[in-house]
Amino acid sequence: MRNKKTLAIGLAAALGAAAAPAQVASSPGFAASSVEIVAAAAGASSPGSGAPGRAAYGAIGSAAPGESASATVQAFSSLLDAFNPFGGSGPLVFRVNPAQGPTGGGTGIEIQGARFQPAGAAVFGPSGVATSATSPTRTYGMAPVSASAIQQGPVTLVVGDAGGTAVLPQGFRYLPAVLGSGGVIPGNDVLVRHYGPAGNAFVQALSFGSAPATPVPGLAGYLQLNVQFPFLIFLVVSNYGPDGTAPVQFPTPANPALSGTTFYWQSVVLPPTAPEFSNLATTSFL
């Protein structure tokens, strides 16, 4: 990809080293969806198991090498006992849909999970709204106007009712937004996710430095990147996908000089949408 080459060349020039191929660590495993966990806890059978409830592990994953199926089922049973989605108190949140919206608020959201009471609240950063549950697994609300000092970007979402609260760091994104991966080892890939109006063009920018939030005539939000030489690495025009996201993966040089440094990311939405800066995101190197 052109973006990969641009970043690799820019970093190599800045650090005085040749770019190295990406080294992405991976490990085998499986992911259990919330739907399958709830089905198991509620007593649903896994395909072909004929056994209800806790035997539903087969719908999620296979036994580990050298471990019997019964031992795996027992381990999963212990997990469900601790998780206990249909007992205890306080809401559990599995999904927020949609998890993003404009800074002006007004986005209707569905929160999926367990143990919701009929009346509750959802707090988006510093602002709260009422929620109304139609069942113990579905509750609804409307995102308020962003009240953060920098209106764009992710905020902590807290969902609560008389039973307790559930906290989701970066649970909702006010658009345009950008998130960068952190704790990267030099030589590994950096994953940056941009969020904005579906299909719209935007500029993504990378810098070695940040700057105080500065308003720019004609653009909403604030410029927070240091765009002076030699800090600014590149500006690239891209488009958000049909789902309003634009994930971009960049390689980095396997150069120890990167350790302890920080990248700064920001994007700008382009017309036909009203031009607007995103939040400032960071990627730190170990």
Image (cartoon, helix red, strand yellow):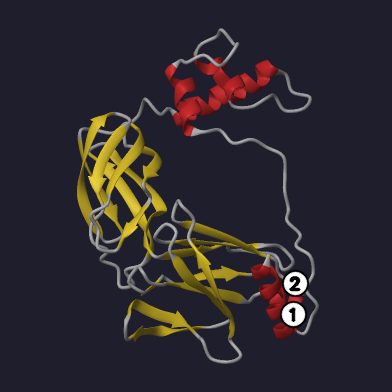
Task: Identify the image quadrant of the N terminus.
Answer: bottom right
Residue 286 in view, yes or no? no
In the image, residue 224 sits, relative to residue 42, either above or below, namely below
Instruction: Classify residue 13 as left or right of residue 95.
Output: right
Residue type highlighted by circle 1: Ala
Residue at left offset 23%, top offset 57%: 144
Residue linked to disc 2 = 253
Residue type highlighted by circle 2: Pro
Q: Residues within 10 Å of mark 1 (few under 14, many from 20)?
A: some
In the image, residue 55 sits, relative to residue 139, either above or below, namely above
| Residue 78 image-quadrant placement | top right
Q: Nearer the viewer, residue 186 or 98?
A: 98
Percent of width and height locating residue 40: 49, 21
Residue most toward the bottom? 229
Residue most toward the front? 272
Kindly indicate whether the residue at mark 2 contacts the one at mark 1 (C-beta within 8 angstroms). yes
Residue linked to disc 1 = 12
C-alpha distance separating marks 1 and 2: 7 Å
Q: Secondary structure at mark 2?
A: loop
